[in-house]
């Protein structure tokens, strides 16, 4: 029987799109047990909150974009670029295909600004320490459970892996062996200055290609290939493609976080996700689901 979620997750926070489909998926996940499970999650506004106490939480890019030790010219430039392209990304009237070239343009311009600023790798821990980063409620508990039971957590981000790794080091204690990040990496020169970013660039709308590429070439991902049951966590419509590197998944349960403009975006999200967590809600649903799979697997 499904776990009673009312103890952790307020009913109004979680929307099950298709009750029968989700019940069947949960049953299959429990039957498959811990050893067949992997979690694939977006980072920004999925593992982290969108806002906390009325203030926007810094994204992996915003950690750099808001850093006090960078020049005003850089901060102004990056904010202008972000505002322009964020409006395009969030425009419900534009299709994904229409948005794609703008996303590439955004990332390219932002990265060029960073190279021109001559940022050194020594600044990364300071940037993260200064940033406003708040994980969702129950992230700490979820991360602990996943680590204890060696359940892989594959974190996808169109941001910067160097910064996200440092966030995990500072907020969680370290990068655990069950965790792996697929994201853009800084390229440094011999003196530790940023001279570019890794290729191919990962952005909001090519996570499917990145997933497939890494699925073929990455040893960590190959080591979890036998795990065919996937719980996917995302906050954008493009995030549902993050599981495309998993060959022949048996179960794929997609949990989407609709952080704001819920009424406006709900129908689009219902088309691609199975479970929706509304209004910047918690990871309570996911934590309880994983606990149910663990208990089912050992019962």
Image (tube, helix red, strand yellow):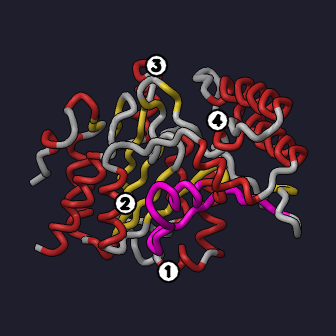
Q: Is residue 209 visible?
A: no
Instruction: Kindly identify which residue carries mark 1.
Output: 223
Element class at badge 4: helix
Foreground mark, 3 or 2?
Answer: 2
Query: Does residue 167 belong to the magenta stretch?
Result: yes
Q: What is the spatial separation of the Cα atoms under label 2 and label 1, in whole angstroms?
A: 20 Å
Pointer 1 and pointer 3: residues touching (CB < 8 Å)? Answer: no
Q: Quadrant of residue 151?
A: bottom left
Q: Residue at x 59, y 41 (%)?
A: 131
| Region in magenta | 164-188
Q: Quadrant of residue 200?
A: bottom right
Q: What is the spatial separation of the Cα atoms under label 1 and label 3, in whole angstroms?
A: 40 Å
State which tag comes first along the sequence, 3 or 4. 4
State which tag comes first along the sequence, 1 or 3. 1
Tell me if residue 190 comes above or below residue 109 in the rendering.
below
Instruction: Kindly identify which residue carries mark 4.
Output: 96
């Amino acid at each position: 029987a499904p776990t009673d979620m009312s103890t952790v997750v307020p009913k109004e926070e979680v929307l099950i799109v298709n009750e029968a489909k989700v019940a069947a998926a949960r049953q299959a996940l429990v039957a498959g047990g811990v050893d067949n499970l992997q979690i694939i999650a977006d980072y920004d506004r999925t593992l982290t909150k969108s806002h906390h106490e009325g203030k926007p939480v810094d994204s992996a890019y915003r950690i750099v974009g808001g850093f006090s030790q960078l020049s005003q010219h850089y901060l102004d430039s990056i904010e202008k670029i972000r505002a322009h392209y964020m409006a395009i990304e969030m425009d419900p009237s534009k299709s994904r295909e229409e948005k794609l070239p703008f996303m590439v343009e955004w990332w390219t311009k932002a990265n060029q600004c960073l190279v021109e600023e001559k940022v050194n790798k020594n600044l990364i821990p300071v940037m993260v320490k200064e940033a406003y980063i708040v994980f969702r409620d129950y992230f700490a508990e979820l991360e602990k459970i996943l680590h204890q039971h060696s359940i892989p957590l594959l974190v996808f981000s169109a941001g910067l892996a160097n910064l996200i790794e440092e966030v995990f080091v500072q907020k969680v204690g370290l990068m655990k062996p069950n965790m792996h990040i697929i994201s853009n990496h800084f390229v440094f020169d011999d003196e530790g200055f940023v001279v570019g970013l890794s290729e191919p660039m990962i952005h909001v709308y090519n996570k499917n290609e990145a997933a497939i590429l890494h699925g073929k070439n990455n040893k960590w991902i190959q080591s979890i290939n036998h795990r065919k049951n996937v719980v996917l966590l995302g906050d954008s419509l493009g995030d549902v493609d993050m599981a495309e590197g998993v060959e022949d998944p048996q179960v794929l349960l997609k949990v989407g976080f609709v952080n704001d403009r819920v009424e406006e975006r709900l129908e689009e999200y219902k088309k691609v996700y199975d479970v929706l967590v509304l209004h910047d809600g918690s990871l309570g649903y996911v934590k309880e689901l994983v606990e149910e799979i663990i208990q089912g697997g050992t019962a």
